[in-house]
Image: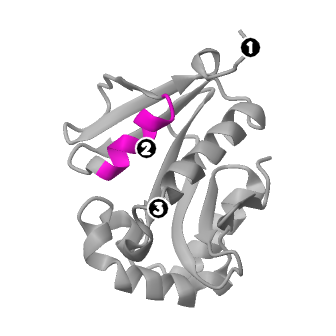
Amino acid sequence: MPPWLITLPDFSLRPWTPDDAPSLARTLSASDAHLRAFTPWVVDGRVPGVSLADRLAKHAADFSAGTEWVYGMFSPDDTEVLGGCGLYPRVGPGAVEIGYWLAVNHTGRGLATRAADALTHVAFDVLRVDRIEIRCDRGNAASVRIPERLGYRLVDSSDAPADLLVFSRTRTAAPGAAT
């Protein structure tokens, strides 16, 4: 299982809980236009009619069950939602997808890059996957730079819509990986 808490120098990752709903709602409201441009599902949720607290409870249950691992990104004192990220085993056997988003007032500081890097290590070292994908809207230049910085390669993917770029990294191609 991935770690419950990942502590980085200026923020932490931990699974969402229903108690995070008020903080997350404030963050989503303040970041609505920023997120809606490329990740409308973050704002709207994936299941219409499901409350934010229920959505977070499902994320927590899925994390515990080991079906997917969705983290909130929090300030060091755990009082502010900076964004979210996760590991999603929806891209085939032996593989996970990393997804991420940031609140509008926390972009440009490298937080998503460092979160994706931490999750890359968790995926390879803890989950022992063979391949990781990061999918980005081709129009979101800031998001596209993240997998490029982390050594992911742009690949063709027949299952991706035309507006998505698919980046991939394999265990054997990971920097410092044993082959």
> Horizontal placement of 132 versus 76: left or right?
left
Is mark 2 in CB contact (under 8 Å) with mark 1? Answer: no
Residue 55 position in % (x across, y down): 55, 74
| Mark identifier at residue 109 | 3
Instruction: List x then y, in percent, for residue 87.
Output: 59, 47
The residue closer to the viewer here, 12 or 44, is: 12
Answer with mark 3 or mark 1, whichever residue precedes in sequence: 3
| Residue type at tag 1 | Ala
Badge 2 local density, few (<14 within 10 Å), some, or many (20+)?
many
Residue depth check, mark 3 versus mark 1: number of the one nearer the observer: 3
The earlier-in-sequence mark between 2 and 1 is 2
Query: Which residue sits at x=78%, y=37%?
Result: 126
Q: Residue at x 62, y 23 (%)?
A: 175
Residue displayed at 32% across by 31% down: 159
Using the rendered view, name the quadrant where residue 61 is placed: bottom right
Protein image colouring: one colour
Q: Is residue 173 left or right of residue 162?
A: right
| Span colored in magenta | 142-151
**Residue 168 vertical position relative to residue 71 in the rendered view, above or below:** above
Residue closer to the observer: 105 or 59: 105
Viewer-nearest residue: 95 or 114: 114
The residue that mark 1 highlights is 178
Label the magenta part by its dominant secondary structure.
helix
Could you say where residue 179 lies in the image, as x and y percent from the top left? 71, 9
Q: Residues within 10 Å of mark 3 (few under 14, many from 20)?
A: few
- Which mark identifies residue 146? 2
Q: Is residue 53 magenta?
A: no
Kind of residue indicated by mark 3: Arg
Q: Secondary structure at mark 2?
A: helix
